[in-house]
């Protein structure tokens, strides 16, 4: 991968860790919502009790109303602000998870593609060599039938001695094998060219 960017293993590790982080994040958001509901319910109950106390005592108890009229709304506004901020963060976390999943899938698809190309290249090489050695073996078999009729001893190659027929047949076998390899290579590449045009 490009330098400076995480590799596939790092991305997979992040992909395993992020859902757990998202779950924790969601739980914290739910807790904030619970706190907000708790404050609203307690503020309502507090107001009711204050009205009952005021009805019983009949005196000014405005100092006790500060909690329900100032503090509770302040805390609720703060929780609303936090919820807005953190909900946005949860969306970003979900997008990050989706992005990492996409990158991992692309990386894996590219690796599969490279493996398939290598496999296809190896398959083509084996086919070419099979054609070459098969054709060379057939021609060698035909040539070797005539060698057993020659009773000359095998001598070293030198300018003074004429070449032994074995050397000529060996040379001819090698040339024919190389020729069949070239033909096999041409035939397979021609077939792949046709496949490429169809796709």
Image (cartoon, helix red, strand yellow):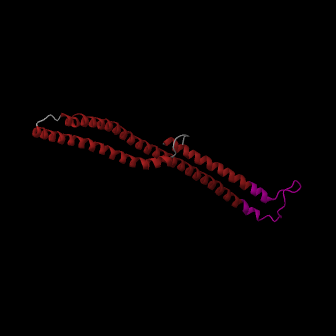
Tell me if residue 139 is in the magenta stretch: no
Q: Is residue 55 left or right of residue 20?
A: left
Q: What stretch is highlighted in magenta?
A: 143-171
Q: Nearer the viewer, residue 160 or 29?
A: 29
Q: Nearer the viewer, residue 95 or 22?
A: 22
Question: Where's the N terminus, which quadrant?
Answer: top right
Residue 147 placed where, x, y %?
76, 62
Q: In this view, does 32 lie to the left or right of 56?
A: right
Residue positioned 75% across, 57% down in the render: 170
Residue positioned 49% across, 42% down in the render: 198
Q: Which of 77 and 3 is in front in this view?
A: 77
Q: Nearer the viewer, residue 184 or 64?
A: 64
Question: Seen from this angle, which residue lies furthest right?
Answer: 160
Residue 11 placed where, x, y %?
47, 46
Residue 125 placed where, x, y %?
61, 52
Q: In which quarter of the image is residue 49?
A: top left
Residue positioned 27% across, 43% down in the render: 35
User: Relative to 14, is 134 above or below?
Assistant: below
Residue 166 placed where, x, y %?
78, 60
Residue positioned 34% across, 36% down in the render: 85
- Report the number of numbered marks: 0
Q: Quadrant of residue 68?
A: top left
Tell me if residue 153 is in the magenta stretch: yes
């Amino acid at each position: 991968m490009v330098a400076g960017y995480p590799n596939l293993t790092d991305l997979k590790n992040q992909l395993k860790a992020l859902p757990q982080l998202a779950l924790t994040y969601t739980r914290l958001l739910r807790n904030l919502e619970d706190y907000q509901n708790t404050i609203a319910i307690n503020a309502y109950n507090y107001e009711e009790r204050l009205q009952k106390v005021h009805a019983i005592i009949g005196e000014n108890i405005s100092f006790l109303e500060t909690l329900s009229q100032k503090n509770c709304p302040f805390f609720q506004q703060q929780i609303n602000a936090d919820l807005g901020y953190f909900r946005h963060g949860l969306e970003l976390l979900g997008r990050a998870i989706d992005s990492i999943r996409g990158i991992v899938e692309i990386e894996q698809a590219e690796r599969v593609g490279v493996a398939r190309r290598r496999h296809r290249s190896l398959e083509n090489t084996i086919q070419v060599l099979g054609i070459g050695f098969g054709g060379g073996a057939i021609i060698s078999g035909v040539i070797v039938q005539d060698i057993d009729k020659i009773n000359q001893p095998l001598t070293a190659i030198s300018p003074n001695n004429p070449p032994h027929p074995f050397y000529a047949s060996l040379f001819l076998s090698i040339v024919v094998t190389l020729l069949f390899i070239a033909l096999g290579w041409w035939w397979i590449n021609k077939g792949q060219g046709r496949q490429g045009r169809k796709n």
